[in-house]
Structures are given as C-alpha cells and as structure tokens.
C-alpha cells in the first residue's frame, strides 16, 4: 500500500508501445515506398512512356508490347504525365516521411526511457517539467474519464503560466499521480458536469387516495 511519501514511478504502457511502433512502421514503410518509386518505379514508367511516344511518331506502336515484356514496362504507359516532375515528387515525399519517422522515433525513445514520477510535494513529466503541487492552480479533468487525460496548469519559477499533462494511457498508474496532486491541491478543478439520473418509479412517493381523487376531479371531461 502506497503512502504519501512513497515515490510514484509510472512507466509507459503496452498500448503506447504497440500504437507508436505501428505508426512508425507505417511512416517508414511509406518512405521506403516513395524512395523505391523515385529510384526504380517511376523511371521505368518514364522510359516506357518515352519509348511509346517515339514509336507512335514512327507508326510502330505494335512493337511496344514485346519491348514492355522484355523490360518490365507497363502494358499501357501513361504518355500524358510529366514523369520527371513526378519523380521529383517521390523524392521529396520520401525525404519528408523519412524525417517524420526519425522525429517520431526520437520522441518514442525519449518517452519509453523516461517516466512520469511524483514524490510527496511535486511531480515530474517525461519532457522535464517539474511541477510542485503548491504551484498548480487549475486541473482540467474533462477528458479524464474517456481518454485518461488531465491538464495541470501551474506557475514556474519565473511566474509564467504553464501546462503539464498527466496521461494515464501512456503512463500506467498515472491516476496515482493525479490523486496525490488533488490531495494536496487547493485550486480550481474543471470536470464534466454529469447528468443526474431521473428518479425511478419506485423512488417516487405514492399518491394518497385523496390526492388521486382531487386530480381526477380537476381533469377536463373527455
């Protein structure tokens, strides 16, 4: 059983690992696909289109089928497309998705190597935010029940307002950090207003015979 002085350490969850790894595989896969089309796929299609245009000018289109089979060209080349421009697009797309994948990998490694932690007086996020409980002035819990997200607004040493995130989907057991913060918190808590359930029929007071008779007399005749 944890105590108020015990250090809380929340590591990344299996859900986070699976989700991030799947996303990185997708992004790096797209990058490889774009680079392949830049280096191999689109140049073949460009060569096929150029050859078809050459044969058309010479009225020798019938020879294209044999050449296509020999060189691995498409059966019907697109002669209207600007293949040089398209090849450049594939290179740019490959670079952009590759950079995005590297950025995702960097943040993934940083997250899994770190942890959300808390002691008796403060908590620390994986991106280096140190939040003393006394500096927090607002907790936004509106996404907690559905997404496991709580936003903590606090003031740093310079008096600047900052926001830290407690994420229970990424860091298993983050609810313990939130509970400890709330136990030492005197500011504003923003939460979803929950609709009150209508009283059941069993909970409604029964009408006396006199009240029922009065309602019957007051109702208009049909």
Image (cartoon, rainbow, N blue to C red):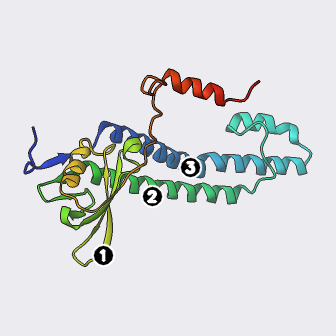
Mark before the other along the chain sequence, 1 or 3: 3
Q: CA distance from mark 3 to mark 2?
A: 13 Å
- Residue 218: numbered disc: none
Residue for badge 2: 99
Mark 1 residue element? loop
Mark before the other along the chain sequence, 3 or 2: 3
Mark 3 residue element? helix
What's the residue at 79%, 39% (across, down)?
76
- Specify few, some or many for label 1: CA neighbours under 10 Å numbering under 14, 14-19, or 20 or more: few
Residue for badge 3: 34
Q: Where residue 33 sits in the image (x, y, percent)?
A: 54, 45
Reply above or below: 85 against 22: below
Image quadrant for the N terminus? top left
Reply above or below: 40 against 88: above
Q: Which mark is nearer the camera, 1 or 2?
A: 1
Circles 3 and 2 in contact, beta carbons < 8 Å? no
Q: CA distance from mark 1 to mark 2?
A: 33 Å
């Amino acid at each position: 059983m944890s105590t108020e002085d015990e250090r809380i350490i929340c590591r990344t969850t299996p859900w986070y690992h699976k989700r991030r790894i799947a996303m990185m595989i997708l992004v790096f896969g797209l990058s490889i696909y774009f680079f392949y089309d830049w280096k191999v796929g689109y140049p073949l299609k460009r060569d096929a289109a150029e050859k078809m245009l050459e044969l058309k000018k010479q009225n020798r289109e019938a020879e294209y089928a044999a050449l296509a089979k020999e060189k691995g060209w498409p059966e019907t080349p697109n002669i209207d497309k600007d293949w040089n421009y398209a090849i450049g697009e594939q290179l740019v797309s490959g670079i952009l998705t590759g950079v995005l994948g590297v950025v995702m990998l960097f943040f993934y490694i940083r997250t899994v190597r770190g942890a959300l932690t808390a002691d008796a007086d403060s908590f620390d996020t994986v991106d280096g935010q140190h939040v003393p409980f006394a500096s927090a002035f607002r907790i936004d819990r509106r996404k907690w029940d559905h997404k496991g997200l709580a936003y903590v607004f606090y003031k740093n040493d310079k008096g600047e307002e900052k926001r830290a995130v407690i994420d229970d989907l990424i860091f298993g057991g983050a609810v313990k950090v939130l509970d400890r913060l709330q136990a030492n918190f005197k500011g504003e808590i923003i939460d979803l207003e929950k609709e009150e359930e209508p009283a059941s029929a069993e909970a409604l007071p029964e009408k006396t015979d006199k009240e029922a008779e009065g309602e019957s007399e007051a109702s208009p005749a049909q």
